[in-house]
Image (cartoon, grey):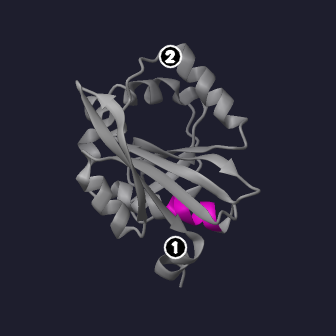
Amino acid sequence: MKNDSKPVKLLVGDRVYLRPLSLEDTETYFQQLFDPEVRRLTGTTRAFTKEGIQRYIDGKSQDSSTVLLFICLKDSDEVIGDIALQDIDPINRNCNIRIAVESKYQGKGYGTEAMPLMLDYGFGILNMHRIELEVFSYNPRAIHVYEKLGFKQEGIQRDYLYYNHKYHDCIKMSILEDEFRELYVK
């Protein structure tokens, strides 16, 4: 029997939507974790197994400190990346955000569209006050996009990441709820 059900669209933008992952997404997520450019930009060094990814997806679906979603194209339902709010702290009302877009879809504005959708969820639904991120110094394009989205640089962790025979700085950035609302909520 063919499954013709439409994917759940939790957060919807003009060209992309964000949806939850399920165990049926294990293969897709596994393949994305080996995109060489995504691994470089995210500083990923670990190797993964399908079984490990399946346990990860299952665990995250039951973890109230994380919201993990796929980024999908509206016109084709194709998965092009993932985005997550992590380390959600409801008492201090903060968390961090991370995003990964497959290399063939980078530079097309999909991440720039997905981030405000997830930030709106974090500030408007989860009642966060502060959302932070980390970006490596060798990714000036991402730094520029985050600044354009309203993130402010807070500090630099020097020689934070050892990747490809070199140490790299980690730049900490954040956005506060009032800064987000001033830019995005009309």
Q: Residue furthest right?
A: 91
- Residue at label 1? 180
Mark 1–mark 2 Cα distance, whole angstroms, equals 37 Å
**Based on the displayed image, in which of its 4 quarters is residue 167 positioned?**
top left
What element does badge 2 sit on? Answer: helix
Q: Nearer the viewer, mark 1 or mark 2?
A: 1
Relative image position of residue 113 (x, y in whole percent):
40, 62
**Based on the displayed image, in which of its 4 quarters is residue 104 positioned?**
top left
The stretch drawn in magenta includes residue 121: yes
What element does badge 1 sit on? Answer: helix
Tell me the magenta residue range. Answer: 117-123
The residue located at (24%, 44%) in the rendering is 138
Relative image position of residue 121 (x, y in whole percent):
60, 61
**In the figure, 4 relative to 95: above or below?**
above
Residue 1 seen anywhere in this rendered image of the structure: no
- Residue at label 2? 50
Main SS of residues in magenta: helix
Residue 85 seen anywhere in this rendered image of the structure: yes
Which of the two residues, 125 or 13, is positioned nearer the viewer here?
125
The circle on residue 78 is none
The residue located at (32%, 29%) in the rendering is 162
The residue located at (68%, 36%) in the rendering is 61
Relative image position of residue 56 (x, y in whole percent):
60, 26
Crowd rating for badge 2 (residues with CA inside 10 Å; few <14, some 14–19, many 20+): some
Quadrant containing the N terminus is: top right
**In the figure, 115 relative to 37: above or below?**
below
What is the three-letter code of the residue carrying label 1? Phe
What is the three-letter code of the residue carrying label 2? Lys
Q: Earlier in the sequence, mark 1 or mark 2?
A: 2
